[in-house]
Image (tube, rainbow, N blue to C red):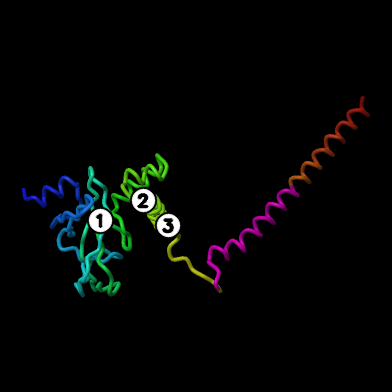
């Protein structure tokens, strides 16, 4: 087992591999990572594309800290050409597109913030509280964005759901009002019948 495979196993990498290490100041460890099988997958459909170019400067993603060391994943993302979606940046197995932290860091950050205050979570994750708050809002906003209705149509600047609500809500209101009036009339008729029955019983007695 090589040193890089040992590092990948110790850090429990899944879906990507370690290709290099670089020790920095202030207990920082940069880990050069690469996707399995050369990557180059489209972020939309997952199919492999043709490499167009590779970025000149690497990107860094914050990963889960280990002991006194803060771990950063390093990689040069590539732009690919997909037959269905054109020119896009390849899908990365360790982070979302545009994110500055890894999937594992996001999960741990969300779990910590559920169990403790943000200040305590920031101390465990070894980053400033303001940075944690910013990352937390970005992550929650992206997750909420993923739960929106896809393919929502618009009519004259209004969402289709808004148009439906403008039509359906008044109809339901009128239906409920009619039902309430009918119920009150039935009750009144039942009351009249009871009174009439009592009066007849009194006359017969």
Identify the residue shown where x is 62% and y is 63%: 166
Question: Local crowd at mark 1 within 10 Å, few (<14), some, or many (≥20)?
Answer: many
Identify the residue shown where x is 40% and y is 55%: 134
Residue 186, position as x, y percentages in the image: 77, 44
Q: Nearer the viewer, residue 161 or 97?
A: 97
What range is drawn magenta here?
157-182
**Label 1, label 3: how far apart the Cα atoms are:** 19 Å
Is residue 65 covered in magenta?
Answer: no
Secondary structure found at label 2 = loop
- The residue labelled by disc 2 is 128
Residue 141: numbered disc = 3
Secondary structure found at label 1 = loop
Residue 23, position as x, y percentages in the image: 16, 54
Please tell me which of labels 1 and 3 falls first in the chain: 1
Q: Are marks 1 and 3 in contact (CB under 8 Å)?
A: no
* Viewport quadrant of the C terminus: top right
Please tell me which of labels 2 and 3 falls first in the chain: 2
**What type of secondary structure mainly makes up the magenta span?**
helix
Name the quadrant containing residue 33: bottom left
Q: Nearer the viewer, residue 159 or 69?
A: 69
**Label 1, label 2: how far apart the Cα atoms are:** 23 Å
Residue 42, position as x, y percentages in the image: 26, 66
Is residue 169 covered in magenta?
Answer: yes
């Amino acid at each position: 087992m090589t040193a890089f495979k040992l590092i990948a196993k110790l850090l429990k990498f899944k879906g990507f591999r370690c290709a290099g290490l670089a020790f920095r100041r202030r207990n920082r460890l940069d880990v050069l990572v690469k996707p399995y099988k050369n990557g180059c997958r489209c972020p939309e459909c997952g199919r492999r594309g043709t490499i167009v170019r590779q970025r000149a400067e690497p990107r860094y993603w914050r990963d889960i800290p280990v002991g006194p060391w803060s771990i950063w994943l390093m990689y040069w993302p590539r732009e690919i050409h997909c037959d269905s979606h054109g020119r896009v940046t390849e899908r990365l197995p360790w982070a979302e597109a545009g994110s500055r932290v890894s999937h594992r860091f996001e999960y741990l950050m969300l779990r910590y913030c559920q169990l403790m205050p943000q200040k305590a979570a920031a101390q465990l994750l070894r980053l400033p509280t303001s940075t944690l708050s910013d990352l937390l809002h970005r992550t929650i906003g992206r997750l909420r964005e993923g739960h929106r209705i896809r393919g929502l149509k618009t009519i004259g600047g209004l969402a289709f759901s808004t148009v439906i609500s403008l039509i359906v809500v008044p109809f339901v209101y009128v239906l409920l009002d009619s039902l309430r009036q009918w119920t009150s009339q039935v009750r009144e008729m039942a009351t009249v019948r009871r009174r009439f029955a009592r009066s007849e019983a009194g006359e017969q007695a």
